[in-house]
Amino acid sequence: MITRRDLFVALIAAVATAGVFALADQKPVMGSAVFDWNTIPVTPTAVGSTRSFFSAPTATLKNLEVHVTTLNPGQSPHQPHRHPDEELIIVQQGTVETLSNGEWKRVGPGSVIFNGSNQLHGFKNVGTGPAVYHVVKFVSSATPEPLPEAKP
């Protein structure tokens, strides 16, 4: 016969097990860090290359990602699209066009582009040399779910 005590112990064990699995599935929170450009591996892509610095939760964000892309002349990293996370792009080198608020805008080194949550955006290198840009993407507790059938 199962007693109340047995049920209570089983309940505590089940809750503890679920908690352990929930914690084990989480990435560690990133604290202050320094990332040396020369130590970040370059990964070739079909349209240029990328350097992925990190992608991790922080004390205030569900995820913070930083990567740097080198885009060959005439190339786009992808078609115009939407996603729920927000991103900041800082152009280091080259001439690019970015789709923002339904309009293509041409910008160069030092320019900053902000792509809002679930907003249609695109990017292409319209210069004669490589374009290099830094991407900072962030997800917070306020980041919405993806839009259903979010297509250009």
Image (cartoon, rainbow, N blue to C red):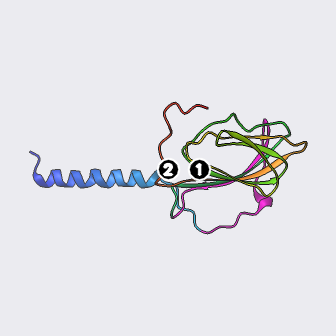
Report the quarter where the C terminus lies.
top right
Q: On the picture, is 111 further left or further right than 24?
A: right
**In the image as oriented, which residue stretches furthest toward the right?**
128
Quarter location, residue 72? top right
- Asked whether, in this view, residue 132 is left or right of residue 57, the answer is right
Callouts 1 and 2 close, C-beta under 8 Å = yes
Q: CA distance from mark 1 to mark 2?
A: 8 Å
Please give the residue where the numbered disc 1 appears in the rendered image: 86
Mark 2, Cα crowd under 10 Å, few <14 / some 14-19 / many 20+, is: some
Q: Residues in magenta?
A: 32-59
Element class at badge 1: strand
Relative height, residue 144 to residue 34 (above, below): above
- Quarter of the image where the N terminus is located: top left
Q: Amino acid at mark 2?
A: Thr
- Front in this rendered view, residue 146 or 44: 146
Residue 146 painted magenta: no
**Residue 143: image tag:** 2
In this rendering, the count of numbered labels is 2
Residue 53 appears at what percent x and percent y?
A: 69, 55
Seen as rendered, the residue at the extreme bottom is 32
Residue depicted at 54% across the width and 61% down the height: 58
Give the residue type at disc 1: Glu
Of 1 and 105, the residue lying toward us:
105
Q: Position of residue 117 (x, y in %)?
A: 56, 46
Point out the tag, 1 or 2, that comes first from the N-terminus. 1
